[in-house]
Image (tube, grey):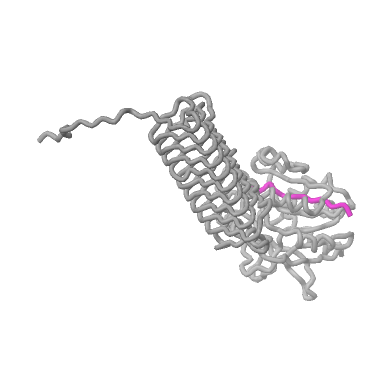
Amino acid sequence: MRLEIIILAAGQGTRMRSSLPKVLHRIGRESLLEHVYALAVSLDADKITVVYGHGGERVPRALPHLDVVWVEQAQQLGTGHAVMQAADGIDDQATVLILYGDVPLLTKETVARLLPLAGPESLGLLTAELADPQGYGRVLRNAEQRVVRIVEEKDASPTERMIREVNTGILAVQGRRLKHWLGRLANDNAQGEYYLTDIVALAVADGVSIQTVRAGCADEILGVNDRRQLAQLERVFQARQAARLMLAGVHLRDPARFDLRGELVAVGSDVEIDVNVILEGRVTLGDRVRIGPNSLIRDAEIGDDVEILANCVIENAVIGRGSRIGPFARLRPETRLAEEVHIGNFVEVKQSSIARRSKANHLAYIGDAIIGADVNVGAGTITCNYDGANKHQTVIEDGAFIGSNTALVAPVRVGVNATIGAGSVLTQDAPENALTLSRAQQVTRPGWQRPSKRS
């Protein structure tokens, strides 16, 4: 059976208090609309149509990678009116699934139960039982518990508002039937809008059976209308992420204080992640990786037995087996660390490669550098890689020892097993197996008195 999916994404989102169209606000790393699109793709839809409105071309312009048919709803006259904009392209024999661009957490499993209910003589409707149904249309049933119509809350009587079974707006229907009912919608209601939910009463009048499915979890059907709800759904989404990782064997010290805003491409065994850790982009974690609290890791590959101490920022870096990072370290893009490298507190590394067993344990900046094996970089050392116009490279060969508070003015090379005396400013290459230092001569003036303040 051909499956066509229409995603309604034209809402203004006034309560978001934002110039950004509502469906472009994010949960995790993706927009609300991208979450719904991912669901549609997972269902192997033959056609996906997105009806956009508020913000005009901003929505399709922001998401050009989506393989969809974009349809504009220039005037927002209700959900029924929104579907009308896409009606001409609907195949008569297709099953049409209506989704919403601001309902991002619906699961494939729930939709899979709904789709088979749509046919020539039946309509599939997703409902939910809510302890607090405020804001939702209510499902009205007759004495035989058959659905007879949906009443929007603003049009509901006090008795009808007490009903806890709500309409999610998500439905599956045959294309021919849908187009027929859309043509019969009216806007004689409190809002003066064309409600898509009114097709339920039209279907009943035509003798079409309304088949319902309850959402597996109430969280699935929650929509976003304001920032509070956006934050609420973020926590639901992150709880799902955390649960999935723990089932895969990851030890999260507190699942409620962990965010995965991307993709954990691979994760080894016995990985431990402390509180307030954020993983973004594409991250790979090897076996026995330990990540301390308050760290941000983005687009990184972290090898076996790596320990990342508290308060580190790691971006677009590769960290070799057995390395130790932090606390308070920053690895910037294009950092490549080999095995058993130590990067300590308040050390920043950018666009540099550091070979095995080398270490920079304190207060250093390493940029545009190639560092060999078994190198010691002393506290306060910096590579002066930028001359105000261009970047230059520093090369430190195997076994070198860089004394504390050294400035390496690039381009410069430090030879194998060279030693640089503390406090040096190196502007020329340092030969191997030798001590190189550049300091002003130390002078002592006996009997010198400090100036005193005048009375």
362, 227: nearer the viewer: 362
Judge left or right: residue 437 versus residue 73.
left
Q: Position of residue 262 (x, y in %)?
A: 64, 50
Who's the residue at 45% across and 37% down the image? 402
Observer able to see residue 258: yes
Who's the residue at 43% across and 34% down the image? 420
Q: Residue furthest left?
A: 455
51, 67: nearer the viewer: 67
Q: Is residue 221 above or below residue 67?
A: below
Q: Position of residue 146 (x, y in %)?
A: 79, 71
Residue 5 forms part of the magenta stretch: yes
Q: Quadrant of the C terminus?
A: top left
Residue 368 lies in what quarter of the image? Answer: top right
Judge left or right: residue 157 versus residue 70.
left
Q: Which residues are magenta?
A: 1-11
Observer able to see residue 27: no
Which SS does the magenta portion mostly show? strand
